[in-house]
Amino acid sequence: MNFLSVVRKRAILILIFIIIFYVAFAIFYDASQFFANVEKINYFFIPLILLAFTASIMIKSLRQFLFLRHIGINIPLKQNITLFFSGLSMLFTPAGMGEMIKSHFLAKRYDHPVPKTIPIVLVERYHDALALFSLIAIFAIIISADFLFFPLLVIGILLLVSIIIVRQKRILEIILNQISRISFLKKIGDKSSEFNESLVSFSSKKILISGWVFSLAAWSLDAFGIYLCFQAFELDFNFLLTTVIGFSSILFGAISLIPGGIGITEVSFVALLSLYDVDSSLSSSLALFFRLLSIWYATCLGIIAMRFILKWNPIKQ
């Protein structure tokens, strides 16, 4: 079974799980009230929300362009954007790791070995987490969100340990041996030195700072999109608070490694809003609204891009 077949089979199973969860989620938080809340949405904000999320995606695609050039892969900007968007079709996989499908297309189109390019996806996830952590920590201090102190401390330690691990060759080899047991990732084990060299290169100060700056810019636009989601439901929360609530739920969902953070993200969002006396039926409606316009909107863009990228013919440099 080839890589695409494995991805397609698992994607179908994950989508079925997601649909079942959302139906159960709506029923649990009073489905009738859920639809009543949806009818009250100010739809004027939707184009602005989608514009903010789209701009964020574009900046993240430029970050990928930077990362590719860092390891000596020069592809046209237009094809880089198409490649990045195609990876969005796999956002609902655990920690977004399905985006490794981009490595498959780079190997097919430009003959770049998979072990060399897979680290880009890992580094992208790291920088996403780092940017989320940075913005949450800064804003949480400003608004005195003390209840986030312990989870932020744990996540901060994990981010620091991750960088230390990348710089330790022996530990990397152990992790690589575990990864190579996955059937469609065996190529990594066959070329571990290439994988290690590529991954370690991303731990340099220059690329860490550059990636962090791009990520902060992108996630700041996501924060604005989340703020507009609150405005669409006429919830008068300030920008700092909506960012802390939205980003905390996203980060909790991501580190859970559950496909798309499904369940953890939505429940965390509702739980955090309950601290500010927001009715659970309203907060659950808002949670599904912002998830629909963020991750599922991005996934749809990815599926559209996938139709184009599947037409790429193998061309060796």
Image: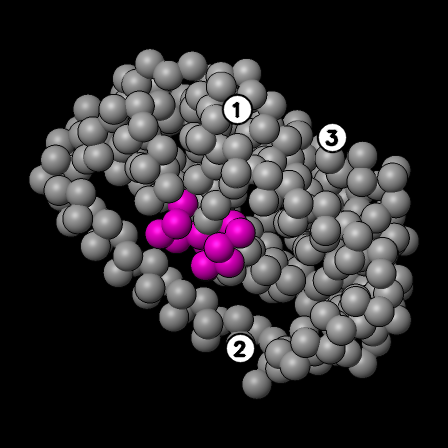
Q: What element carries label 1?
A: helix
Above or below 212: residue 236: above
Looking at this view, name the residue that lies furthest to the bottom: 1
- Color scheme of the displayed model: one colour
Amino acid tagged 1: Ala
Amino acid tagged 3: Val
Above or below 71: residue 48: above
Per the rendering, the mark at residue 5 is 2
Residue 125 locus on image (x, y percent)? 64, 49
Residue 193 locus on image (x, y percent)? 88, 71
Q: Nearer the viewer, mark 3 or mark 1?
A: 1
Q: In the picture, residue 62 is in which quadrant?
A: top right
Range of magenta residues? 254-265
207 displayed left or right of 243: right
Q: Is mark 3 on a helix, strand or loop?
A: helix
The residue under the point 53% across, 33% down is 149
Which residue is tagged 1? 140
| Nearer-N-terminus badge (3/1) | 1
